[in-house]
Image: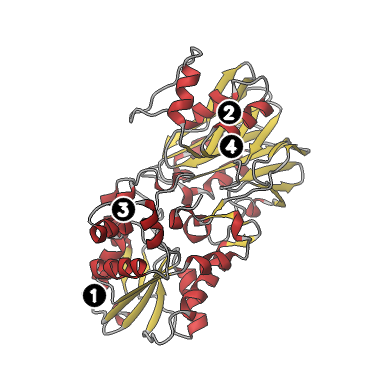
Amino acid sequence: MGGFFGVASHEDCVFDLFYGIDYHSHLGTRRAGMAVYDDENGFDKAIHNIENTAFRTKFTDESNSMHGRFGIGCISDFEAQPILIRSHHGTYAITTVGKINNMEEIAEEIIKKHTHFFEMQNGTINQTELVAAIINQKENFIDGIKYAQELIEGSMSMLILTPKGIYAARDKLGRTPIIIGKKENAYCASFESFAYLNLGYSDYKELGPGEIVVFDADSINTISAPGKDMKICTFLWVYYGYPSSTYEGVNVEHMRYNCGKCLAKRDEGLNPDLAAGIPDSGIAHAIGYSNESKIQYSRPFVKYTPTWPRSFLPTHQSKRNLIAKMKLIPIHDLIEDKSLLLIDDSIVRGTQLGETTEFLYDSGAKEVHIRTGCPPIMFGCKYLNFSRSTSEMELITRRVIAELEDGNPEPEVLYEYADPDSERYKNMVEKIREKLHFTTLKYLRLDDMLNSTGLDTKKLCTYCWNGKE
């Protein structure tokens, strides 16, 4: 994933920019960057690797040395950004969030016009550089951004920093958010709605799908109206969003409470000694479950965060699994001889949750019942980079289905496995339970999850669960 933040102010914006970006640290682990524009000194930019160090530590020097009235920055799981571009539009900086599925085709067409790209170590192109190249095919920023929105298969939201102001453009179907904040003599644009509140900004507006605005310190103007169709990523509420985040008027923590309540309502007859959430994104689900079921909420283990503050670190999966396990410290008095019900936000590969369960059994647990805050993940995301590094056969659901079907089945069969009322679905869940040694396993139903948002379900993307566009 990734997140970005931008500020236009009459005063130096670097303080707001620095902390606004830092509040997006939960969205990425690999690269971070800042770019500013100053009337006297022009553009300045810095990018650092943050795989082993938090954003604040890496950018402390820049927070003191950089100056400007306008600025943008990002946290990214993949490409280095923001990048500086010099073209017929003048010099500008750009940062993006999204995924381009037709990157090679677009790049080849642009290369035919005698344009080149810097190739990254893995042989791919920096997608932010490609977006800039697409924009540069048109005579002005507005036409260029619209062209990018139409041409890109996947999704692409962006901030563009120019000497006159900042362009903010939400992806065509609003799969990721952009929220505008306002305070005296300044505006900001943010992926996360809470990132500007402690900096003195108040909510101004949330951009609609495909909406493009440009703002400076004095005003914000819509230059392309929002579209009617929306497919915002539901996984933002399930996992990626911070508890204090709000998308389309729906708070993440509140939505997770609702999901927990739905799980409890379908769990009649189960009487564990306590209900607990896998730290941190399963905690709200567990509180909702406990409140509805009246089963005591407890913390049979806690996450050690003083020196392990970043949950995604590092990027290599085997090391991530090990560190995730090292961070969980057991409280034996709440585990030994107890029947535990644990709620996690989701099960992707299953490795980490399986190890956590074994760890609880080793610590004396009598039973470990698992519930999840979303349905089984069946398909790799085509629209965001949530699962860009994960092939579908790494998903535990697909591995189990391949075993049950003696190979990869046709899409129609996969759709049947995604149906919680089908026999194939029940067989898949039971097989996963056996593999991961859970006492029982139940997933949140798709209809319950969607209803927990309170939004029109047609506006929510559910592709990773049911394969529906």
Residue type, label 4: Met
First-in-chain label (2 vs 1): 2
Label 2 vs label 3: CA separation?
Answer: 46 Å
Tell me the residue at 61%/41% (across/down).
172
Label 2 vs label 4: CA separation?
Answer: 11 Å
Q: Nearer the viewer, mark 2 or mark 4?
A: 4
First-in-chain label (1 vs 3): 1
Q: Nearer the viewer, residue 409 or 13?
A: 409
Total numbered labels: 4
Label 1 vs label 4: CA separation?
Answer: 47 Å
The residue tagged 2 is 93
The residue tagged 1 is 361
Q: Position of residue 285 (x, y in %)?
A: 48, 70
Q: Is residue 278 left or right of residue 93?
A: left
Q: How is the image coloured?
A: secondary structure
Residues at marks 2 and 1 touching, judged by CB atoms closer than 8 Å: no
| Quarter of the rendering containing residue 321 | bottom left
The disc placed on residue 158 is 4
Residue type, label 3: Pro
The residue tagged 3 is 409
Q: Position of residue 349 (x, y in %)?
A: 31, 56
The disc placed on residue 57 is none
First-in-chain label (2 vs 4): 2
First-in-chain label (2 vs 3): 2
Residue type, label 2: Ala
> Helix, strand or loop at disc 3?
loop
At label 2, counting other C-alpha atoms closer than 10 Å, the crowd grade (few under 14, some 14-19, many 20 or more) is many
Look at the picture and state if 157 lies above or below 342.
above
At label 4, counting other C-alpha atoms closer than 10 Å, the crowd grade (few under 14, some 14-19, many 20 or more) is many
Label 4 vs label 3: CA separation?
Answer: 38 Å
Q: Nearer the viewer, mark 1 or mark 3?
A: 3
Q: Position of residue 169 (x, y in %)?
A: 64, 38
